[in-house]
Structure formats: structure tokens, C-alpha cells
Image: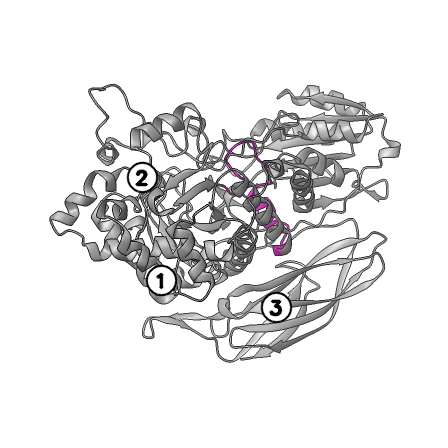
Amino acid sequence: MMSTRFEQAARAVRDGSTAEQEAQALYDQMTDEERLWLLDGDTPFWEGQTNMLTEGYNVRPIVHGHVERLGIPGLRFSDGPRGVVMGHSTAFPVSVARGATWDPALEERVGEAIGEEVAAQGGNFFAGVCINLLRHPAWGRAQETYGEDPVLLGEMGAALTRGVRRHVMACAKHFALNSMENVRLKVNVRADDAALHEVYLPHFRRVVEEGVDGIMSAYNKVNGSWCGHSKMLLTDTLRTRWGFKGVTVSDFVFGIRDAADSLEAGLDVEEPFRQIRGEHLQEALDDGRTSWGAVHRSCLSILSTQLRFAAEHLDEDTPSPKVVAGPEHTALAREVATRAVVLLRNEKVDGTPVLPLDASGLRRLAVIGRLADVANTGDHGSSDVRAPYVVTPLQGLREALPNVEIIHVPDDDPQAAAAAAAGCDAAVVVAGYTAADEGEFADPNSFGSDLDDLFPSPPGDDDGPHQASMAGAEAIGAGGDRERLTLRPVDEAIIRAVGAANPRTVVAVITAGAVLTESWKKTVPGILVSWYAGMEGGRALADILLGAANPSGRLPYAVPTSEEHLPFFDRDATEITYDRWHGQRLLDRLGVDAAYPLGFGLSYTGFELADASVSRTGAETARVDVEVRNTGGRDGRHVVQVYGVRPGIGDRHLLGFAGVDVPARESRRVTVMASLRPLRTWSADADDLLPAVGTVSLTVAAHAADPSALSLELAL
């Protein structure tokens, strides 16, 4: 079988030519029509919309720039990040739950599984490396990111990128400052250069350095410019400042507003269909609003990105469709869900911690709550994974306790819940949120008539209503930014009633962002965060509750005691300013304690840190070594966190972290590679981040407010 021109070019890259040289040679062989074809999706707009609203969103790869004559595969898109949106794939826990593992090696395994499932279903471009910073817990898409801290975001995003790239290209999103959902199509986020480069962009730089293939722009404006039109973001920052060599793509349908402006700014591909560029780009070239030079630049980025990746993977076999939601990947989903659970409270009852529950002593167990037997894996927007099955908490407990009578009370009835719990040996209350409460907001009726101008004319004489969606019919009207940061009042009433009726009551909270628990947390001895836990979440929860696994999750954000300790957030705002202060840093600045600080999480065993040391290993790195002792009678996993106080400014930053498995009553030495980048300060005069000078005060800790933290100093 004869090889295509694209394959020949990829082999030349593998053999020593540059991707740019071979991309230029391909470009020279293309017609002008083929060159423009690279710059948007291959499917006509209304055909694509009809498919999305009838058969479902992204059920197969969405193709951008396939040129059959030359064998150019194009970007064959699959969405994420909780798994592969195409087909019936493995639903992993949502990203924020995976952030709670604080384990890049585990996340890399998730990435490899996701990449394998994308490739097995015909895709080559996974746009699910979601690393927007969780500034406020009300953000509807908190579930799609890893947490509040740039270092955690960057390391987990880099790990996912590494794993995905073993099989397909990886794309990070949404660039940048995308952390409001309801107004994402109209809000202007203002941030000065210091906030941008110190807080909101470092994690994107980290994945660029890891070799991410694509960057997707956000819907919102930054400092007055739509992100898909922002030369400051797409060219000055990404390409000039960071040296990004990959491809830039728009968010779907409403990601750009003008064909020429977006191309001139450095946006390579309009996704997902032939829309604004298909209608207007040729005209803009003819009248001089953009140039063939800009087309050439973007085409070379698109072609060279595909060539570099293809050269790395020549002659590799395509994974079998059998890997999709196969035993290996579903077992990994269970492992991740188990590792993600964060134990927040575990008080003693009759002299013994309430958890783990003693299965041998259980005859009757009450399982309370409307969510206990609901397949609740996250929102129904662009990240939804159509898993072949979902194990609910109730199913997981019934499977794990076949000889125990389990009484399920799903109703919003505190009295009925309390009555059931009173006659049981223990009670588990499952409470929290669903896709109706938080998630992607995709109601086109709320977008405004001004956006209708972005759509091509309907085909033929068909006048009749044409509805545009970014993520298919499943997402319309659902989710959005949260209305409340507490549980529903009836949920809190149920918790208090059940806690009063049964002293062995444990609450499992299903959520993405932080939940305020002050009004009820002391009424029950056990609280854990179980997240939107994926298709194996019910089994994972049972593993933790019954002690088959020791909880090792750590909060990827701080939980405040009051909304007053959060940054300003108005889910209807069309203009908002982001500064440096949010999460644990804002609590530190206010001088108030968190209900649960960044990095907090309990275990069924105990840990102590001792004998810490630090040494400089490079201009931007330091090495911290510390002994971790398991003081209890169970094997367990501990996460060592290193924080540093910025000299001259006094704010504290996470610099690095590392997890370690330690057998009962034993010790292990662990090394944390700490980044010194968070200590840098933006200088307007230098137009750059300047290294810190002086001495850095470090703490080696179990969490951000650890009273037993070890102190170190590092001279810079």
C-alpha cells in the first residue's frame, strides 16, 4: 500500500528533518481551498448542529482539516476531561476529584487510558486537559479542573498530558481566566499583569513545557478582548514568551466573533464546524482585513503539530475497541475514585473512630438521601461520558455487604430518615449536588440575539427555527454556577435528624467545589467528600467506608467557614476583576482559619514528619527531603506538601508535593521537588517575572495549616 504525502513527511521528521520544513513542503503542494480548509471544522455548520442535537454531542470524532488527497488526517477531536466523550467510554472521577489524589503518577495512568480509548474510537486530539483555576466554589464547572492552586493544576495537567500523548495529541483549555459559567459568553475579566503571570497563567505554561499539542481559547474576554481574538494571549504570551509550537483552537460555536481578527491574533482553528471562517474568511482576505501570510502561519502550526506527533508514533498499532471501558480501565476508575475520597471528620463513638465501619458488626445499615441510588457522575455538558454502567453508593454498599439488611430512604423527609436510622447499627447519608445544581450552562435562550449573527444562513429555503448549541441537547438549560454554597436546607435537616437518631452517622458529600458545613458538621461524627466519582464510585465509597481501603485524598482547595472569606463573585456579572487573592491565600491574608485548609485530609492511621532538609537544585527548583513515619496500625498513604513565603511580600505559596505509601509502624524517606517559580514577582519595568531574593521560609506539612509543620530556610 502506497504511503501518503503526509506519512512520507512524518517519516522524514522521524529521520531528522524538522516538522516546520515538512509542513512547508506540504503547504506548497496544497491549493488555496485546501489551505483554508485547515482553518475550521470539516462539517457544514447546520449539518453539524443537527447531528449534535439529535444523535448527541461528540459521539464520534469531530474532524478539522482532513485533506484526503495528501493524507492529512486533521485534528480528530474528542472532548473530556472525565473520560472520552465518544461512544460508551470509561467514566473516571471528575478532574477535581483526581486533583484530590495529589498524585501525578496516577493521573498519568488516567491520561494513558483516556488516550488509548480516544485512539481506539478513531480520534487523535483529546481536548480534556482542563486547568482553569478554581477561584470561587460557586463556579459551575469546578468539576472540570484540579483545584485552586497553580502548582497543583500545572503538575496534574502535565501528568494528564504525558499520559494522553502516548496515544493521541493533548489539548489544554480554556485559555484563559475562564471560571464563570453563566456569563461565559459575555463577561470581561480584568486582571493586571501581576495577577495574570503570577496566578492565572503559570499552569498553562507548565503544560506547554510538558509538550501539550494544543491550546483551546476561552469564550470570555480578558481585559477587553475576546480570548479567541487576544493577540496578548495567543501570540505574545503563548508563542513569543513561552515558545509554544503547537496549534491553537477556539472553543465551540461561540469561540470567535470575527474570522479575520481571530486569525490575525493567532487563533489557528475555528471549532467545531464550518461557520464564521467558512462564511467570511475569503472575503476578509480579498479586502485586506487579513492576509495569506496569516493563513500560512496558522497552516504551518496545524501541519507541523500533526507531523511532530505522527513522527513519534509511526507504525504503532491502533488500540483495539475492546479497551474502551474494559476491565483494566474500569479497575483504574475504581482505584482513582477510592484514592480521591477525602475524610474530613472521624470522631470517636464509644471510644473508637466511627470509620471505618465494622462490617462484621453490622446487621442493619441505613442509607439515606435522594442521591444514594442516582447515577451521578457530573454535569450533562461537553464533558459528559456515556459510561456503559454506573455503580451508585447504594449499589456499592449492597454488593459489599450481602448479608446486611440495608434500608434505603430516598425521600426528602427528615422524620422518615431519622426513624429508619434509629433502628440501624449505623447510617450513611449521601447528600450534595447534581447536574441540575452545577455544571456547564448551555441554554441558547440566554445567550442574546446578537449572537445569531455568528451563524451561517440556513441551507436552502428552510426558514424554520435553527437552534445552536455548544454541547448538544443534553446540556440545554442545566447546571450553571451554583446558587448556594451550602447543601439544600432539607439535606441539612436530614443530616441533623439522622445524626440525632443514630450516633454512628457518616455523611458522604457529592460535590465539585467547596461546601460550607458549619451549620451541621458537629452533629455527626463522620464526614467525607466522595465527589462525582465516576462509573465505579459506589464501589470506591464502600471500600472507604468499610475499611477495605485507607482514605488518602487531600482537599485540592480550602473550604472556608463563611462566604465572607471568599473573593467577590456575581454569576450575572458582565465585568469582573480578578486579583491575586483567593482560596487559602485569601484566608491567610484575612487572618482567618479555614474550616478545612488546602491539602487537608484524614486517614485511618497517623503520620509524623521528621528530619527535613532542603537544598537548591537549580535556578527554579529546590529539593526537600523528609522522613514520613506511619504511627498507626494500618498501611497508609501520606501527601507531603511544601509551602514557601515570598520574601518581601509575605504571601504563602504551595511549591511542591509528593505522596508516599508507608507501611504500619514504619518510616519512609520522601523527596519533594519544589518549584521556586511561585515566589517570583511580576515587574512592569522588566516585563517579566523576577526571581525572589533573600531567604525563603519553608514549611514541610500535611496541609496548609498543619500545626506540626516543620520549618526550613532556603537562601536564594
The first of marks 2 and 3 along the sequence is 2
Q: Is residue 11 left or right of residue 451?
A: right
User: Residue 496 location, x and y as percent?
Assistant: 67, 31
Please say whether residue 100 is one of the residues in the magenta stretch: yes
Q: Amino acid at mark 2?
A: Phe
Question: Counting other residues with Cα less than 10 Å from the Cα at mark 3, is it few (<14), some (14-19), or many (20 or more)?
Answer: some
* Mark carried by residue 356: none
**Residue 159 screen position, x and y as percent:** 56, 55
Label at residue 254: 2
- Sequence-wise, the earlier of marks 1 and 3 is 1
Mark 2 in CB contact with mark 3 (< 8 angstroms): no
Q: Could you tell me which residue is drawn at 18 percent across and 44 percent down? A: 282
SS majority, magenta: loop
- Residues at marks 1 and 3 touching, judged by CB atoms closer than 8 Å: no
Check if residue 683 falls in the magenta segment.
no
Q: List x then y, in percent, for residue 234.
A: 33, 56
Identified at 21% across, 49% down, the residue is 260
Marks 1 and 3 sit apart, C-alpha to C-alpha, by 34 Å
**Residue 20 numbered tag:** 1
* Disc 1 packing (10 Å; few <14; some 14–19; many ≥20): some
Let me know if residue 514 appears in the view: no
Looking at the rendered structure, the kind of residue marked 3 is Met
Q: Nearer the viewer, residue 396 or 135?
A: 396
Which residues are the magenta region? Answer: 80-104
Does residue 451 appear to the left or right of 367 in the view shown? left
| Colour scheme shown | one colour
Question: Which numbered disc, 1 or 2, marks the residue closer to the eye?
Answer: 1
Name the disc covering residue 673, or none.
3
The amino acid type of the residue labelled 1 equals Glu
